[in-house]
Amino acid sequence: MDLLAEYSDGDEEETTTVTKKPTLGAVAKALSRKPVAGVDQALLPVVDAAPQVDTLGLGTVAKWAYNTADKRILTNPSIEALSKPLQGPVPEGKVSLEQSFNNHQMGKVEKMNMSKFSFDEQYLTFHNFGYAANPAKNFAEEQSVVVSTEAVHQEGRGIYDKAQNKRQRVAGPDASATGHKAHPDSQKWGGFVDGEVVRKQLEVEVKAREEEVARQAEEEKAVEGEERETKERTTSIFHGGKETDYAGRSWIENKTNVTKDVDDKQCFLPKKWVHTWSGHTMGVQKIRWFPKTAHLLLSAGMDGKVMIWDYHNQRKCLRTYMGHDQAVRDIAFTDDGRRFYSVSYDKNVQYWDTETGQVIATFTNKKTPFCVAVHPDPSQQNVIITGCSNKKAVQWDANTCSIVQEYDEHMGAVNTVTICEDGKRILTSADDKKMFLWEMGIPVVVKHIAEPTMHSIPQIVKSPDEKYIIGQSMDNKIIAYEAFGRFKFQARKTFKGHLNSGYAITPGWSADGKWIMSGDADGKLWFWDWMKCKNYRVLKAHDGVCSACLWHPNQTSRVVTAGWDGQIKLWD
């Protein structure tokens, strides 16, 4: 039908003559050929050399954010595009995409070049007149000026301004607009600030300064009086007959040769109650063995006293240390046992001589210390770390009674401080239900141990081989971690059954590391197998809370417990 459409009547159509320019080659043949209707349109599509381009959206593409890690940019972006925040999926554990490119804890620090003249000008303006230009790159219009919190803000003044004339208006509605204080004795216009006025102002300032110095002196004197009163009333009572024996040996020396049978024999669970040490008028919070020999037992009571007991022979109290006003929270021997530290609710840390009972040093940071840990290196027995109520773990030097370092990342009171890996690392736990790992002397957290299911851990104890630690969790469990390397959580090592919620009960290890023990709120003593995590024995130890328990390091079946009934009991 398309071919029939080519034919038409000659009468109806008007013929027109078109003059064409002569063409050569294949172009002429192509032009002379008549197009075939329908065929050429289907097989030969028309190509538009200048199509209509939609520019809508090009501005959005041009404003895409650029990666800050790129070393080169092949386009010419605008400042708006360069400063635009990155967009896309945020990796797990990150708050934003820009956090991956931060080189500082507070963000990204960039180098900035500034002339010495400009820096000195802004520096002097900031410290003299209380304001300076904002050094940031991007800030809002109202944040163009940074205001000091120490110097008085004098807007509009600069370091190159002339000194203002002392002639001023003394009174009047606009007297305060000049920035000067009104004359206290005149109500006239156009007064002068003469030498007498300046002298009066200086006298007032001098008098205020003298009152401040006197007040500070009274405070220092009061503190010295309290310390002197503490030292004067600090007494130590020796309950034995003589402090030395016939051979001149001190009472703290070990005179019994007890064979150590832990290396070749395993520990056994105690069965019966053997002895009771009585002397504390209130509950006993902590007990410690004398290092290595364990022939003496040191106890910290809530009556403010620290007592040392004889484990062999007559098993009586040998000396009482009375230096604290309130309950003693924790105690710790030095490496040789000749000295020990005690911390109390009276906010003092006291350094004692075990033999003579004298206080070597007393220091405080006005915060309540909850625990104390001594450095394991024998040459650094003067370095201790206390966990305080101000959310800090404080490192002290006992020789100078000064603070060496503060570890202040916790959000709650620090309950325990455990020194691991031969003094290289510190593990702290606090009321914020977190455990932080630190490098010794560096107040930067190396590892955060925190889970949504974790509870507060008020007591932590290391194993005898120092490979594991156990913690008294406040959900009536004892949990375990590695004490080295990554401090991995031991999920299978969970010990249950006892009731400890709300009490800082100190757990314990057997000397061979086979048994785990802990007291509870009902006064019972629980024993678990370390490998099987199974409870094997429960003893009724105390009438109140059983607050602490210790396994004798040299005798395989001897256990000592302490409770809030004021008694210390020996079990075999």
Image (spheres, rainbow, N blue to C red):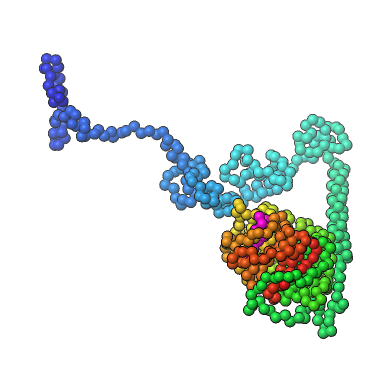
Q: Is residue 470 one of those drawn in magenta?
A: yes
Q: In which quarter of the image is residue 325?
A: bottom right
Q: Is residue 18 above or below residue 416?
A: above
Q: Can residue 97 be seen in this view?
A: yes
Q: In this view, does 265 lie to the left or right of 88?
A: right
Residue 414, percent from left and from top: 70, 57
Residue 162, percent from left and from top: 72, 42
Q: Quadrant of residue 390?
A: bottom right
Residue found farthest to the top? 11
Residue placed at 80% from the left, 69% from the top? 277
Q: In this view, does 3 lie to the left or right of 51?
A: left
Q: Is residue 520 above or below residue 54?
A: below
Q: Can residue 424 be seen in this view?
A: no
Residue range corresponding to the magenta coloring = 469-477
Q: Is residue 484 one of those drawn in magenta?
A: no
Q: Which of 402 and 176 is in front in this view?
A: 402
Residue placed at 11% from the left, 17% from the top? 10
Residue placed at 73% from the left, 59% from the top? 522
Residue 509, percent from left and from top: 66, 68
Placement of the C terminus among the 4 image quadrants: bottom right
Q: Nearer the viewer, residue 149 or 66?
A: 66
Placement of the N terminus among the 4 image quadrants: top left
Residue placed at 52% from the left, 44% from the top? 85
Q: Is residue 479 above or below residue 277?
A: above
Residue 333, percent from left and from top: 74, 70
